[in-house]
Structures are given as structure tokens and as C-alpha cells.
Amino acid sequence: MTFDSYGNLTVAGVADYLKEKEIFPANANLTVVDLHAVKESIEGFVNLIYHVYDESGKSVIMKQMLSMPRFRIEDEKNNTVEDSNRGGWTLDLGRMRSEIATLIFWNSVYPGICPEIYLFDEPSRIIVMEDLMELSLLRFELCRMVKHGHFTNKIGAFFARNLFYSSNLHLTNYKKSEVERFFTNPEYTALVEFLFHENIGVSWERDMIPGTAEKRTELVENPAIQAEFKRLENKFMEDKECLIHTDLHSSNIMISADDVRIIDGEFAGFGPLAQDFGRLTASLSLNYVSWFGDTDRTAEEKADFHNYLLTTIEDLYSTFQNEFRQLVNTHREESYSLKTLDVDAYLIDQLQNALSYTGVNIMSRLANRGICYDLLRLPEENRLIPCLLGLDISKELMLNHRNYTNIKEYTQLLKNLV
């Protein structure tokens, strides 16, 4: 049987399905690999994902959205998986439509930044797309101390182009409202509970390792921090600035020596660019603090990789700002709003909001449930210092982000850690 009783493809049925859709010839000898069986290939369990290839070398990735109205939670600490309806998070077919449209739009803004789509079978909730298996997840590359100098040039430029071409900076109010409606995604709010309500800086719902309670209390009981959480949540929900990924951490970026791709845009929708910047900056920052708990690398190796991470963060922001300035200068005569735009003030505001979102996103990955791989790879007894440093960084950014006017002031904060 190709499909099970819930309408989900069986592993045995994948090959037949792809031949039926003429992705592969009828006589092809196909190998089907369930990527959930390959720990390093993916994070998350809301889709069925397969890598399929034949003897000629042709290959694709096939993704099917689960038909059951639930998602699966991975407990990375105990290496277990449970089905859950937690928080009322249900999957909607509109999420898959949104992902397809988003990937196509982003490839038009920055060609090759996302995988190419070969097939969208809406009734069966299936996407067949370009195979990126020769690339690695950025998160695992960082945890192996692999350096990729080209990464920031592409992502920084993409951020600027995406912001410009999907916002009122380029679109008329009418066109922008039409584009927003087109990209309406029922799953845009999927991370709200995780980021703003269950976050360790807001709630005691999620546990952390022993030794963190005192610093955590300083966050949970600080009225200014709680007000900042609320401001950022409201901004996330109400500021329809541009088309954003919402979940652009280092496990949703694939990379090789000469290629960079953004994947898994299921939660994309119109919101503040600062969330995407903050989520990615948080990933880089979490990797930075993780090396303070690593005992396998030498002090020289860790210092060298710390310098690489600092340069990476600086280059990401400087590339974005340079590309954005060029876009404004190129199109300034086309728009009154561009003629009157205070570019310096605009970019500083983007930076400050991104840094505050960085604090929220760092904290979202420090709890035992939802802990990032950068810390999970460490023995539990070695995670305390990185977690405490993460809490310190988050507190500083949420309280004092308006004091930062240059990204180097943030990297200096990281340099000054123990």
C-alpha cells in the first residue's frame, strides 16, 4: 500500500509514487532513505522526509506534511519522541502552500538561496524538491569548527533584498497589502508559545539544569524584561514589515564550501526582519558560548573559532547594511519614502530590535526541552557555564539593546565574557 490509513506515504510507497508522478522513469531502481533515521540530517518531526536517488545519480528530497492534527516533540536529552497536541498547535495545508510560495519568492529575490521545487501535490500534501544532501546543516558545521567565509555574504545580502523587495520600501501600500494576503500562513504564529510564553525568561514551565535558578529569577522577576518580552511579541504579531522565515536558526541553513541554502519555510509570513536576524544571531551566539563548556578542544582552537564567530556576526550585519544602502541609493528617485528615509537611523533601529530578539531566541534554546545541539553535545555537567553566559547575554540585550549602535559593540560584549 502506497499510503497508510491516515493518508501518509509509507516508505515502501515512496518509490512507486515518484515513478507515477514521472519524477523518475518507471524502470528506475530507487533507494529511499527516511531522513528521520539519520539524526544529523534534520531537526523536527512535523513532516515525513525522504532522500530518494537512482543508480544514475539523479536524486530528490520528498517531504510530506503529516495528516494527523498534531506534531511530534523530540526530547533531545533523553533521545525520545512523543506525539503531542501541546499548545493547540495543529498543522494546516496552508502551511505547505505558504512554504512553496515563499521558497519561489526568495529564489526570485536571491537566485539559488532556496532549494528548487519540482512538484507540489497539494491533495497528498507532498513537495518534491532539489536534493541538498551534499550540503551540511550549518549548526553541525559550527559544532565541528568548520569555517565558511562565504556564508555571511549571501545571507546578509539576501536579508537586505528580501526586506527591500517585500516591504513598503519598494511596494506601494496597495501592492504590499495584496502580497501580505497572498503569503498569509496559518502557521506563522507556531513559535509564539515557545518564544514568548514558555520561554525560560518568562515562565518556570520548562526546566533548566541545576545552578541556573538564581540568574533565571533575575529575568522572570524583572518588570522591564517582562515588558520587553511583551513588546517583542506584539511586534512579531503586528509589525508586517516584510516576508520573514521566523525560524531561521543554524539548523535551517544548509552549507558547503561554495553554496548556502535556506530551508524549511513552513512558518514564514509577514513580520519584523529583526526576528530572523535575532534567531540567526542567537544561533551563532549559542555556538560561541558552547565552547566555554567544551573540554575536547585546545584553548588555542577555541580562541581561533571564537574569533571566526565574532567576524561572522560582524560580517553578517555589515553585508546587510551595505547591500541595503545600495538598494536605497539605486531606487531612491522612484519613491518619495526612500528620498526622505534616514538610512542610518533605520539601520540602527533594525540592529537594536535584532539584538533584543537575539536575547529572546538565546533563552528559547537553553531549557532542557528544546535545548540546541550546540549545548546538547556537551556532557550535562559542562553546560552550566554556557547556560549562565547565555542568560547574562540575554539580560543585557533585553535591558540595554537601545545602547547599541554598531554590531561591533555586541561582539565586544561576547569578547568580554569569561
Image (tube, grey):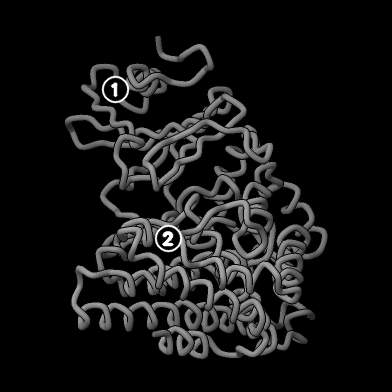
Judging by the rendered image, the residue that carries numbered circle 2 is 250
Question: Alpha-carbon neighbours of circle 2 within 10 Å: few (<14), some, or many (≥20)?
Answer: many
Place of residue 3 in the rendered image (x, y in percent of width and height, measured from the top left):
45, 15
For the residue pair 337 and 204, the one nearer the viewer reads as: 204
Q: Is residue 210 visible?
A: yes
Q: Residue at x 32, y 72 (%)?
A: 291
Q: Say if mark 1 contacts mark 2, CB within 8 Å.
A: no
- Name the residue furthest top: 1
Q: Quadrant of residue 152?
A: bottom left
Is residue 54 positioned above or below 355 on the image? above
Total marks placed: 2
Image quadrant where one finds the N terminus: top left
Q: Is residue 190 left or right of residue 144?
A: right
Q: Residue at x 58, y 37 (%)?
A: 96
Q: Is residue 112 visible?
A: no
Label 1, secondary structure: give it.
loop
Query: As shown in the figure, which amino acid type bears the numbered disc 2?
Result: Ser
Place of residue 37 in the rendered image (x, y in percent of width and height, measured from the top left):
31, 35
Query: As shown in the figure, which amino acid type bears the numbered disc 1?
Result: Pro
Q: Residue at x 33, y 36 (%)?
A: 35
Q: Residue at x 49, y 83 (%)?
A: 318
Query: Mark 2 or mark 1, which is nearer the start of the sequence?
Result: 1
